[in-house]
Image (spheres, grey):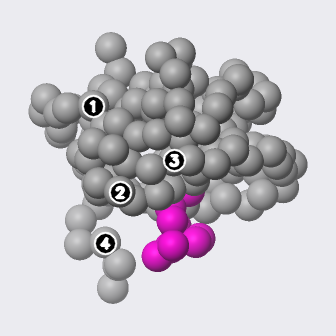
Amino acid sequence: MSETPYDPRLITPKVYGDRRPVAGEVVALLHVTFERRGLKLIEARSRALLLNEIHELMITDEEDAAPGGGADRVSAIAFFEIKRGGIVVVGDEVSIGGKVLGTLAGFDLTHMPNHMNILVKTESLEAPAMRVGDPITFRRAP
């Protein structure tokens, strides 16, 4: 029996209607890059991010990182706290301090229930300039 009561491939971005942006704030900076992280992305394409939760933000330059897959080349760049909850969906645009970081690639639950790893596809593994207190926004891609 499958762990998922439906075929996750049926849940595409067009399933989701209008939704508000999810807002967060950087609470801690991280400075670590992995060449063989072995991140395992869950098949679900969306997650609810609840007010006051803290999650880890990671980036990858692997173009094929997607739900149900994984990523090895990963940089852990920050922990952030949710200031305005909502629903985030793979493909959403992710910004830090008003500058686009990349697109949401998926979710890894290795450290749950402590925190979720949220993976963003970027052009490089170089962490953007940011500080504790900077805003993070997840919004539907234009």
The residue pinned by badge 4 equals: 4
Q: Which residue is mark 2?
A: 52
Q: Would residue 59 be seen by someone viewing this image from the given angle?
A: yes
Q: Residue at x 51, y 65 (%)?
A: 115
| Among numbered discs 4 and 2, the one appearing first in the sequence | 4
Judged from the image, the secondary structure of the residue bearing numbered disc 1 is: loop
Q: Position of residue 123 (x, y in %)?
A: 69, 22
Vertical order, 108 against 63 (above or below): below
Q: Amino acid at mark 3?
A: Phe
Q: Earlier in the sequence, mark 2 or mark 1?
A: 1
Check the picture and name the quadrant holding the N terminus. bottom left
Q: Which label's residue is closer to the chain start, 3 or 4?
A: 4
Q: Position of residue 45 (x, y in %)?
A: 36, 49
Magenta stretch in the rendered image = 109-119
Asked if marks 3 and 4 touch (Cβ < 8 Å), the reply is no
Q: Residues within 10 Å of mark 2 (few under 14, many from 20)?
A: some
Which element type, helix, strand or loop, lies under badge 4? loop
* Residue depicted at 73% across the width and 47% down the height: 30
